[in-house]
Image (tube, helix red, strand yellow):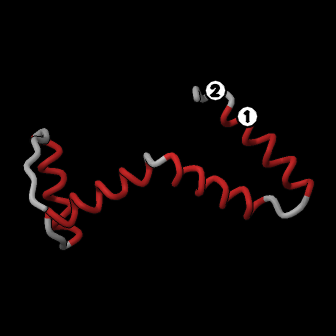
Amino acid sequence: MKTAVSIPDDVFQQAERLARQLQTSRSRLYSSALKEFIARHSDEAVTEAINRVVDAIASDDDDAAFVDAVAWHALRPVEW
């Protein structure tokens, strides 16, 4: 699908340089960037990623208690 968007000149220039550096088209660069942005802002994807990390770390009860404590400390200041 084709679309037109307006972006600041400096962002456009940075994207042009990166596309050349990666030897890819501007369209592919923008598409990849949007896919990554959407994935990072998907609540479900974030939750799944956190769960994978916790599962990988928490192999026994001592580890699980540590992971719970660290998670609580890290997430406490976040507004839900």
Q: Where is residue 80 drawn, in percent x and y?
A: 58, 29
Helix, strand or loop at label 1? It is helix
Q: Where is residue 73 drawn, in percent x and y?
A: 73, 34
Residue tagged 2: 77
Quadrant in the picture for the N terminus: bottom left
Q: Where is residue 38 drawn, in percent x and y?
A: 37, 51
76 up-or-down from 2: above or below: above
Residue 28, picture quadrant = bottom left
Residue tagged 1: 73
Three-letter amino acid code at the position of disc 2: Pro
**Of residues 44 and 69, which is closer to you in this image?**
44
Residue drawn at x 24%, y 61% is 31
Residue drawn at x 72%, y 42% is 71
Q: Where is residue 60 drawn, in percent x and y?
A: 89, 61
Q: Is residue 33 left or right of residue 28?
A: right
Identify the residue at the far bottom of this view: 23
Q: Is residue 33 left or right of residue 13?
A: right
Q: Is residue 62 left or right of residue 3?
A: right
Helix, strand or loop at label 2? It is loop
Mark 2 Cα within 10 Å, few/some/many (few <14, many 20+)? few
Three-letter amino acid code at the position of disc 1: His
**Of residues 16 and 72, which is closer to you in this image?**
72
